[in-house]
Image: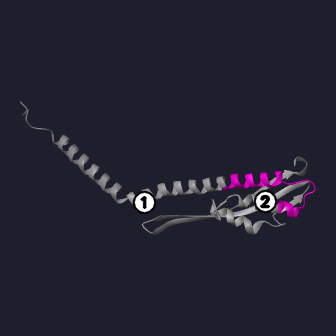
């Protein structure tokens, strides 16, 4: 029996049609879900941005604490420590605004409850609130409110 060389097997035709249908469904699904995928990518970047902001604030706080203590003269008092800390904090202002708005929260915390001496150490304890929102097309996708507390200590003998 001789086969017709011009004809194709039906299984190949069905395979090609099934591949085209599957590709079309996949493209349609990806197009329909693109907003949800984009929101997930925003979430990762959004959290990274919040944690990066925390690290920058920690760096500034450590720098302010170190400079405030190094600026103390012999026979210093707690009021002088608070005043030095306030002066160092004000160095992070440009045209009356803090370079990071979250630093403004420290001004109300410069008191004897947060800057004190304990067990031969100078202790500074502050709480900072970070807020961040992801907005797309004037719609808030999600927001984060993050509170962290930072405590610095330095032995008095090392001053």
Residue 100 lies, in percent from the top left, at 63, 60
Residue 99, quarter of picture: bottom right
What residue is disc 1 on?
36
- SS for tag 1? helix
**Which sits earlier in the primary sequence, circle 2 or circle 1?**
1
Q: Does the magenta run of residues contain 58?
A: yes
Q: Quadrant of residue 81?
A: bottom right
- Is residue 117 found left or right of 97 in the rendered image? right
What residue span does the magenta drawing correspond to?
Answer: 57-82
Q: Measuring from the top left, give residue 8's x and y in whole percent.
A: 13, 38
Which residue sits furthest top? Answer: 1
State the residue position of label 2: 85
Taking the spot 45% from the left edge, 69% from the top edge, the residue there is: 139
Give the label, 2 or 1, closer to the camera. Answer: 2
Q: Which residue is drawn at 70% across and 54% down?
A: 60
Measuring from the top left, give residue 144's x and y in whole percent: 58, 64
Residue furthest to the front in view is: 95
The crowding category of the residue bearing disc 1, from other C-alpha atoms within 10 Å (few below 14, some 14 to 19, many at least 20), is few
112 horizontally vs 55: left or right = right
């Amino acid at each position: 029996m001789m086969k017709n060389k011009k004809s194709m097997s039906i299984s190949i035709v069905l395979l090609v049609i099934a591949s085209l249908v599957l590709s079309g469904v996949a493209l349609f699904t990806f197009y329909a879900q693109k907003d949800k995928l984009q929101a997930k990518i925003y979430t990762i970047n959004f959290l990274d941005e919040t944690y990066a902001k925390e690290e920058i604030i920690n760096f500034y706080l450590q720098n302010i604490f170190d400079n405030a203590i190094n600026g103390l003269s012999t026979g210093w008092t707690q009021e002088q420590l608070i005043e030095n800390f306030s002066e160092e904090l004000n160095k992070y202002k440009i045209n009356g605004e803090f370079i990071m708005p979250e630093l403004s929260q420290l001004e109300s915390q410069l008191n004897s409850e947060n800057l004190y001496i304990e067990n031969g150490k100078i202790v500074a304890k502050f709480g900072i609130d970070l807020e961040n929102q992801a907005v797309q097309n004037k719609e808030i996708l999600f927001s984060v409110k993050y509170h962290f507390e930072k405590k610095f200590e330095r032995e008095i003998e090392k001053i």
